[in-house]
Amino acid sequence: MSAFQNITFTDSPFVGGGGRRIIIAGGGTGGHIFPAIAIAHALREKDASIEILFVGAKGKMEMEKVPQAGYAIEGLDIAGLNRQSILKNIGLPYKLIRSFLKVRRIFSFFKPDAVIGVGGYSSFPVLRYAQARGIPSFIHESNSFAGKANIFLGKKATKIFVASEGMDRFFPRDKILLTGNPVRKNISQAQISQLDALEFFGLSMAKKTVLAIGGSLGARSINEALAENLDAFDDHQLQLIWQTGKTTGQEYEHKGNGKENIWIHEFIKEMEMAYSAADMVISRAGAMSVTELCVAGKPVVFVPFPHAAEDHQTSNAMYLVNKQAALIVKDNEAKERLVSTVVELSENIALQKQLTENIKALAITNADEIIAKKILEIIQ
């Protein structure tokens, strides 16, 4: 059977016009998808004739979120290396070959003027093929510790947009532009009073509010630490907005039964409300979480996920900790130290003020516009 059989392309209003054509590749997590969509919006705001096609990985959340944002997307049957099970990698070479063949077909059909990689499995074959064809390629590296694929692709990239200082240890210095990470407009432009936000969650202005977010799938160490120490919130006149994550949400939702100071749900769609309600935040240290917290300007205690590639979440968190802009608790110490650290922070007004001032100083709210402007300058 031909490798091209059964390969189809999405009908889309962004395909077939006369403007410049750009492919945006990547996804897998909200930390890749939401910046990619923000960049797409910024490009089309600057030039409405631009045609944009996303390329993602089948079965990942970009296949749902990108069409919801109004863009066409093609899915590759691709996955990363499984370091825990060699047997699960048996089909990886076949998937990689299939992905490159489909990328070649996409390029032949769409004829892009440029490609942008935002991280995730689908970025590699798209950018690698573009570079082999001499098509301008751009990388957005959201983390403060670059992944191996981006380091490799960066050698031939046209421009590399980064969120942190010191990224010349991974990429050629002359290709780097410090832009920050694009943030969703509903967060960067939010003008919601804390009173309105607390009323949204059914909570009181009389108590300080802690927001706990472990990502869309959840963070077991954070959830277990909160579940075992919920009484401490009541004891110290604190209230909690707790996003448990979808993976283990049902294990914890009953913990808030009968507690007026605890709001629990597996996922928070209205994050602008959550940030506006919070006085302090507990969070993983994914790139977008870090970026959004800088924009929100809240004192934060990071609990980095230690098994992220190259332990980049710890690197992300330490970038702020070293600037006296955040606190950190190790994942394996969360049960013993997390809630007590938050309680101590809630009672230390001077430290709250210092963390707030320092984290706000790191905020960049127009990264999407900076990136879009530079890309269009280069490919015009």
Image (cartoon, rainbow, N blue to C red):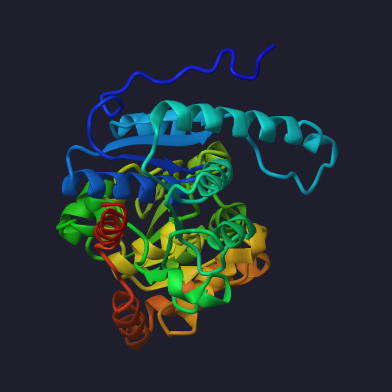
Q: At which x and y percent is residue 34?
A: 37, 47
Say if residue 58 shows up in the picture: no
How many tags in the picture?
0
Above/below status of 222 relative to 3: below
Q: Nearer the viewer, residue 83 or 220?
A: 83
Give residue 343's position: percent from left, percent from top.
Answer: 45, 74
* Residue at point 54%, 31% (across, down): 104
Quadrant of the image for the N terminus? top right
Residue drawn at 64 percent across, 19 percent down: 3
Of the pair 128 and 283, the residue shown nearer to us: 128
Residue at 31% x, 62% y is 278
Q: Quadrant of residue 279?
A: bottom left
Q: Classify 369 as above or below 168.
A: above
Residue 136: % across, % down: 42, 51
From the viewer's perspective, tell me whether residue 303 is left or right of residue 346: right
Asked whether the viewer can see residue 27, the reply is yes
Q: Quadrant of residue 275?
A: bottom left
Determine the residue located farthest toward the right in the rendered image: 87
Q: Is residue 318 above or below residue 110?
A: below
Q: Residue furthest front?
A: 134
Q: Which of these two is toward me, 118 or 290?
A: 118
Q: Nearer the viewer, residue 313 or 357?
A: 313
Q: Horizontal and vertical percent for residue 75?
A: 51, 29
Left or right of 332 on screen, residue 172? left
Residue at x 38% of width, y 76% of height: 346
Q: Name which quarter of the figure residue 148 lies in.
A: bottom right
